[in-house]
Image (cartoon, rainbow, N blue to C red):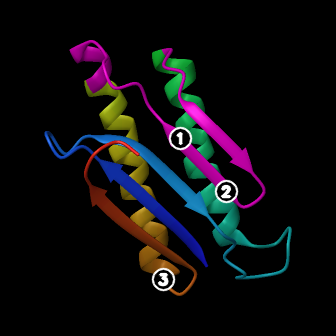
Amino acid sequence: MIKIIINRRTSDDAIHSFSVQGHADFAESGKDIVCAGVSAVTIGTVNAIEELLGIVSDTVMKSGRLTARFPERLPDEQEEKLQLLLEAMVVTLKSIEQSYGSYITISQLNGKRR
């Protein structure tokens, strides 16, 4: 199962980091559309943030695991754009979860940076 954790700041509910770990085991390696979809959405979001906004996240990517943390202090306009891209990622992941809930779970946590 793929486990996704979205970490939000308590002060303003903004996303400051997320992590993805595990494998869906929906199908054999190379044919697993759930893993491919989650990977495309999460990695694509991190790449879009870096390419379009110039924000470099603290990212760790290993087999079956992706963790991304974003800078805490950004200019307001840049922060708004960052949050829009991250919220779009969450919406897309929730769509995958609705269709393939046996293979993916999403948790959203509020609290201090980890």
Q: Nearer the viewer, residue 83 or 5?
A: 5
Crowding near pointer 3: few (<14 within 10 Å), some, many (20+)? some
Where does the image place residue 35, in percent across and percent down from the top left?
Answer: 68, 66
Q: Looking at the picture, does residue 26 appear above or below residue 75? A: below
Residue ID at (84%, 80%): 28
Q: Which residue is mark 3?
A: 101
Per the model, the C-alpha gap separating discs 2 and 1 is 10 Å
Label 2, on which residue?
65
**Does residue 71 show up magenta in the picture?**
yes
For the residue marked with disc 3, what is the amino acid? Gly
- What's the residue type where badge 1 is placed? Ala
Question: Mark 3 or mark 1, which is nearer the start of the sequence?
Answer: 1
Q: Is residue 92 left or right of residue 29?
A: left
Name the side, left or right, on which 61 lies relative to 42: right
Instruction: Give the quarter of the image for residue 32.
Output: bottom right
How far from the left and from the top, in percent, is residue 100?
53, 80
Mark in the foreground, 2 or 3: 2
Identify the residue at the far left of this view: 11
Circle 1 sits on which residue? 68
